Amino acid sequence: MIQAALQKNPRNVSALVHRAHLYGEMGDRERELRDYDAALGASEPASPQRRHVHWSRGWSRYDQGDIEGALSDRAEAERLHGGRPAWVTYTRALAYWTVGDHATALHWYALAASGYPEWGTDEGMEQRIRYWSKPQQARMRALYAHWKAG
């Protein structure tokens, strides 16, 4: 289905992002980044599509251990959003926790929990991370446990 969409339109931003994600899951970082770059080139500046590319590439960069790149992509997605998207607080918390900046991570997690009450409960937090990768879940659980212990 993705290939068919790209054969019909090689500049299909959504299909490029989906394929990039699949390449990332397969460990093919070169093709993953190539497709993200192609998606950025095919998306209009300041568009919701461009914002989605940055948000998605931010997760990929996070998974690759490029936390600085992940934060940069997410900051650009936030800027393009024009508001205060719900994912800003918890993704920043996760990124800072991952690099060992626990004080900053706890600050961002507290903001997530105060703005979105589900982040402040065991059940809610588990529900929010249910589709995340195992390493992402483990890090968020550790962060949550420290936040909860207060």
Image: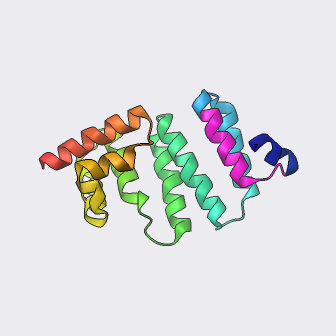
Count the marks: 0
Q: In this view, does 147 lie to the left or right of 46?
A: left
Residue drawn at (51%, 34%) of the image:
64
Residue drawn at (30%, 52%) of the image:
124
Pinpoint residue 137: horizontal percent, then vertical percent. 36, 38
| Between 75 and 135, the one nearer to me in the picture | 135
Q: In this view, does 47 lie to the left or right of 9?
A: left
Residue drawn at (46%, 35%) of the image:
65
Pinpoint residue 15: horizontal percent, then vertical percent. 72, 48
Q: Does the magenta stretch include residue 14?
A: yes
The single residue placed furthest to the left in the displayed view is 150
Query: Does residue 99 appear in the picture of this structure?
Result: no
Pinpoint residue 63: horizontal percent, then vertical percent. 48, 36
Pinpoint residue 74: horizontal percent, then vertical percent. 49, 55
- Assign the N terminus to one quadrant of the image: top right
The single residue placed furthest to the bottom in the displayed view is 83
Q: In which quarter of the image is residue 112?
A: bottom left
Residue drawn at (41%, 59%) of the image:
88
Q: In which quarter of the image is residue 144?
A: top left
Q: Is residue 24 left or right of residue 126?
A: right
Instruction: Name the dominant secondary structure of the magenta segment.
Output: helix
The single residue placed furthest to the right in the displayed view is 8
Q: Quadrant of residue 31?
A: top right
Q: Is residue 67 magenta?
A: no
Query: Does residue 68 appear in the picture of this structure?
Result: yes
Q: What stretch is highlighted in magenta?
A: 9-24
Looking at the image, is 110 positioned above or below residue 149? below
Coloring basis for residues? rainbow
